[in-house]
Amino acid sequence: MSGLVPGLVKAELRKIFTTRLWWIMLIVTLLLVGVSLGFLIAFAGVAQNGAALPALDTPQWAETAWSGGASVGIFVMILGAVMMTSEYRYQTITGTFLTTPRRGLVIVAKLVAGLLVGALFGLAVLVFQAVTVIPAVTIGGGEFSLTASRIPQLSLGILATLALYAVFGIGLGALVRNQIAAIVAAIIWAYVIESIFTAIPALHGVGKWLPAGAAQALMSIDVDTGLGKPEWLPAWAGALVLVGYGVLFAAVAAVTTVRRDIT
């Protein structure tokens, strides 16, 4: 048993890394981060809609630019959904379960592989941000500061967000099974449902308990120990909520896959 799960995880990683999908999604992810950073660089210190963006040489600009890395969670969510639904689409799930009849172990392996892939995407985003943000601040006449811009906390939030969003995608794929439906559901969830609840202040009471709200809390300044604030949860509570969603989706993935006929 102890050696079976690592072997299954390696098999799942081999499945994803022998396809073109992962690096295509990674390139798209980094392109989106690059576009966002380019916008922030171009309009640093420029007034937009009556409010000026932070100047390029300020810690506030570096903080704003760095925090944008969490916004690409949708891509790892889609990748996680495809990791699960492609097995049903191409009927490779039959061979997978014949090789490993204990379906729960297969799901565990997929979830662990999803965490690793999501973390890999997070690391790639952080490296890309480092080679973009640090030179931009330096060229702009500022001094890049890890502590003043809260880079360690933001980086941890980005890693946790992308890793757990991959788990969400796998759970969603196990629940829906149809690849197109799972991708559409992921897009609607990220860009419609979560956006509404996290963008409208009056709805923050609900939005802060959603994955996007929990991810926002991970990167917030608030270290208060209470849960009654109307904006976001404390950072520690955001981490617990994200982990809770990961466990929930893992349970959904395991239960639905074990009980369903694969044909």
Image (cartoon, rainbow, N blue to C red):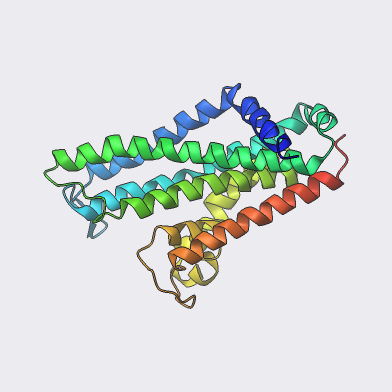
Say left or right for 171 vs 42: right
x, y percent for residue 87: 74, 31
Q: Is residue 53 visible?
A: no
In the image, residue 180 sits, relative to residue 73, either above or below, namely: above
Which of 239 and 205 lies nearest the eye of the viewer?
A: 239
Residue at the image point whose x is 24% and y is 42% from the top: 41
Query: Residue 26 at x, y = what percent?
Result: 48, 31
Quarter residue 77 falls in: top right
**Residue 69, percent across and down?**
40, 45
Q: Residue at x 78, y 27 (%)?
A: 92
Give 218 or 175, whichever is nearer the viewer. Answer: 218
Q: Quadrant of the N terminus?
A: top right
Residue drawn at the location 41% of the way across and 34% of the way down = 30
Q: Position of residue 158 (x, y in %)?
A: 43, 48
The answer to whether residue 141 is above or below residue 12 is: below
The outermost residue toward the front is 2
Would residue 68 be visible to someone looking at this image? yes
Task: Left or right? Give the position of 127 relative to 57.
Answer: right
Q: How many marks?
A: 0
The foreground one among 22 and 226 is: 226
**Quadrant that contains the C terminus:** top right
- From this view, report whether residue 189 is shown above or below residue 173: below
